[in-house]
Structures are given as structure tokens and as C-alpha cells.
Amino acid sequence: MLKKLAIIFIAVFGILLAIPTLVPSSAKYFPSWIKPIPLGLDLKGGAQLLLEVDTSVMLKEKNVQLYDEVRSAMIDRDKGVIRFSDLRNTENGVSLNVRDDDMVSKAKGRLRKVLGNNVEIDSKGKTLNITYTPRAREEMVTDAMTRSIEIVRRRIDALGTKEPSIQSQGGKYILVQLPGVDNPEHIKELIGQTAKMTFHLVNENVTREQINSGRAPSGTQFLPYMENPSQTVPVYSHVEVSGDSLKNSEASFDQNNMPVVTTEFDASGARRFAKLTTEHVNERFAIVLDGKVLSAPNIREPIPGGRGQISGGFTLQQAKDLAVLLRSGALPAPLKVIEERSVGAGLGADTIASGKIGSAVGVLFVLVFMVLLYGLFGLVADLVLIVNLLMIVGVSALFGATLTLPGIAGIVLTLGMAVDANILPFERIRDEVKSGVPTLRAVDYGFTRSTKTVLDSELTNLICALILFQFGAGPIRGFAVTLSIGVMTTLFTCLLLTRMIIEWYMGGKNRKIGYIRNK
């Protein structure tokens, strides 16, 4: 009795999970964790972007950091300065010449201690070549991919986009699917910005002639204004405060009711920002975003507390976008849009209509076929098939799966396999009855002796679905998810629910089974 109650409870629970999807207006009567199935890109319309993570730029920046670390280690006054010359970046790392022969070993030991096991140090005479190990470079690339995916996700979520699909593909690409997005250009622009913000002092000693000639003094670089690229600002290359220290950023309005971006630094960044504004009162500093100067205001007074304000003639939307970019963090490597695809909502509606018609026709033929072939037992199979369909929808909604066109194909395929899982025990029952076994015992034998075959068949399908999910991407994964859920619900409905209903009909007696026919 307890087993039957459990079967009924699971079936009813699965059906209830499907109601918000089938009747969206009823969703308000259900708990918040029971939601309708969201439609995918091919059904709802939207945009799909394939982004390439340009890790070569990231690795060049790592080489620049390695240059600074090597230089700092060699001139460490606490441990003693090691004289060197010709320190420069190479294609894969840094090289330098140690001036004294007897200091080469000491230099290698110090660099090894400071830089750890992430680098390889080769020496040819007094020349040291420091490069990252292949494993370290691989970890950098993997970390850049992981961080890029998370940052892209935060940027899209901050824009209010629902149910985005963001996943790694091929080790260097990110596939972004945005159902319901009607302005992909805007989102593409925000995703593609590196959003690396730094604060630099302005070099006021540079002459107009030097700016016009484009020859920047050592330690200085000419950066264009974001609003007016033809106008450049001479800024010191040294980064005074990095945007990595930002804790929060919000769009706001200044005293003149103009849109601005307010920033708040963490404890470390606040100390550096306070020191910068205290030591350089009445000097200018440049706020640089992705190599362009947002603004270069004059420091009127020290700014303690780590709170600042960025102004630059923004519109309200520009201020909101910049706040989102800064809040979500800088991309570790630039992203390139190498493929873009848009799906209109009209096409999605046509696809839904075609999918409904195709699914309805297919299911109707199956239902009629089962009744014609198996009579009363065919009606039982049809009832269980409908319960199976509702459970697939309900469980998919519970797991947060997104319904796509391949997902609909997975549902139809699952229903076909579910019919097969019913036919196997029915045919076994037919054979038992023809051999003279009483109908009640034939039902028991039919389900018991066909269970292994049904399990083998469904588990084979489940293994294929898991492989598709593991190695597939996008629509392939949607198909695999739907198929996997369908396999589990089919095993439950065909092996447990169907048998329970038939045994209830038999009532413990050898009733006549009307579908048996001699072949």
C-alpha cells in the first residue's frame, strides 16, 4: 500500500509542476520555486554571440608584470642590490645581464625565491632568461576564460537579461545566447569593452611641441580623450590606483543634475587614493578606461574615505553602462565578436506553432495506434503516456531547463521510446496468455521478465544523452537534458505506474484481457 501511495504522490507532484507552464496565469498560485519553463533562443527570439578570448594580449601583460617583479627583486635594497643591465621583455618573458660573474648564482636564487615555481630561469653565461612555465601559462589561459565568462555573466545580469546561456566552447571561445534581447548591438558593445580603469598623474611638463610631434618622454604616454580622440593627454605610465581596487560604482547625479558615476574603493584602494589626492593637490590626474581618458580633473583637496566621482558629459544611459562595467570588473583579456546571429520573435512564434502541430500529430497517431493494437491496455498506456509528458514538462521546469526546438524533439523522441517501453511488457503478457498462463500471473510475468530489457534500453539512451551533454554545446545540450529527464520519467511511468493501474484493474482476479489476438 505504501508503495502505491508513493507512486501516486510522485505522479501527481510531477503533474502539478507542469501546470504553471501549461497555464501561465496559474503561476501566481504556486510557490516561487515552481516556475514555467523559459523559452530558448530559437523559440523566443533574441541574439547569439560567439566571442573569442584574445589571451595573447593577456600574456603580454603578464610579461610586463614579470618585468616589474624581476626589476624589483634585483634592486631590493634590504637584501642587497644585484647589478644588472639590458633588462627587457622578450616574446615569452624577460631577459637581463648580470654584471658580475660571481653574482649569477645569487641572482638566480633570489629570482627563484621571489617568483616561485611558475617560472623557468635559464642562464647562458651572465645572461638570464626568465619565462613562465607551460603549466603556468596554461593556468593563466584557463583562469582568463573562467573569469571572462563570470564577468560577461555579471554584465548581462546587471542589464536585466533573463535566462542567458553563457558557456565555454573549444577552450578559447565563449558562446552567449540571449533569449528575448531586441538590442544586441548595445549588449555586444558592453560585453566587448575590457573596462580596465586606472588612475594616472598628468605630466604637466610636456610641451605642446612634443604633443604635436607624438614623441612622448620616457615614462609618459599620450592617451586620447574618449569624447574627443583628436585631443591627447600626456599621462605618466605609472599606475597610481588600479580599478581592481573598486568595491562599488553607481550612476548618480551631481549638484548640477548632470549624470555622473560615483565610485567606492576597498580599504587598500582608499588608502592609495587618499595618498594620491593628498600629495598632489592642485595637480591633475587622469581617469583612464581602456586606454582612453575619461576625464582629467584638477585635485582641489584631499579625498579621504575612498569615495570619488567620475564626470565626463555622460548621458544617463552611458553613466549606467559605465557603472555596470566598473562594478562587474575588468576583463582579463579582450573579447572579439567573431559570429553574431539574431532570431526574430516572429520566427520563434512560427517555430512554436510548428512544434505544437508536429508534436500533437505525432502523439495522436501513437495514442490511436496503442488503442487499436492493445484495446483496454492501450488506453492505460495512453493515459500513462500523457502523465509521462506532463512529468517531463514539470521536472524540466523544476530543474530550470530552457525549452528549445531540440528540446521539443527530445520530448517527442522520449514519448516514442515510452511507447516501446509499454509494448515490451504487453507483448510478453500476450505470449504468457497464449501459452496457457492465467491472466493475473501473466501480468506479473510480463512486467517482471521484461523489466531487464526495458532497463537496458533506457539506460543505453541515458548514457548517450549524458555523452551529448558532456561534449555538446547549445542546442545539443538542451536535447540531452530533455532526453535524460524523459528516460527517468519513462522508467517510472512504464515500469511502476502502468503496472499499478493494470493490477488495480485486475483486482486480484483472472480477468479477461480483450486485446489478446492470435497472430
Image (spheres, grey):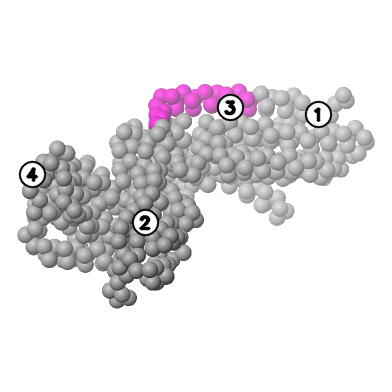
Mark in the foreground, 3 or 2 = 2
| 419 vs 144, nearest the viewer | 144
Q: Which residue is mark 1?
A: 515
- What is the secondary structure assignment of the residue under circle 3? helix
Q: Residue furthest right?
A: 436
Among the two numbered marks 3 and 4 on one chain, the one whose residue lies closer to the N terminus = 4
Q: Which residue is mark 4?
A: 209
- Measured in 3D between alpha carbons, the distance from the residue under mark 3 to the one under mark 4, in whole angstroms, is 74 Å
Rendered location of residue 26, percent (x, y): 46, 40
| 144 part of magenta stretch | no
Task: Check disc 1: other Cα within 10 Å, few if <14, some if 14-19, many if 20+.
Answer: some
Q: Which residue is mark 2?
A: 94
Task: Check disc 4: other Cα within 10 Å, few if <14, some if 14-19, many if 20+.
Answer: few
Residue type, label 1: Tyr
Q: Which residue is mark 3?
A: 359
Rendered location of residue 14, percent (x, y): 58, 45
Residue at (82, 29) in percent of width and height: 514
Residue at (40, 46) in percent of width and height: 55
- What is the secondary structure assignment of the residue under circle 1? loop
- Residue 74 can be seen in this image: no
Query: Which span of residues is magenta-colored?
Result: 340-364
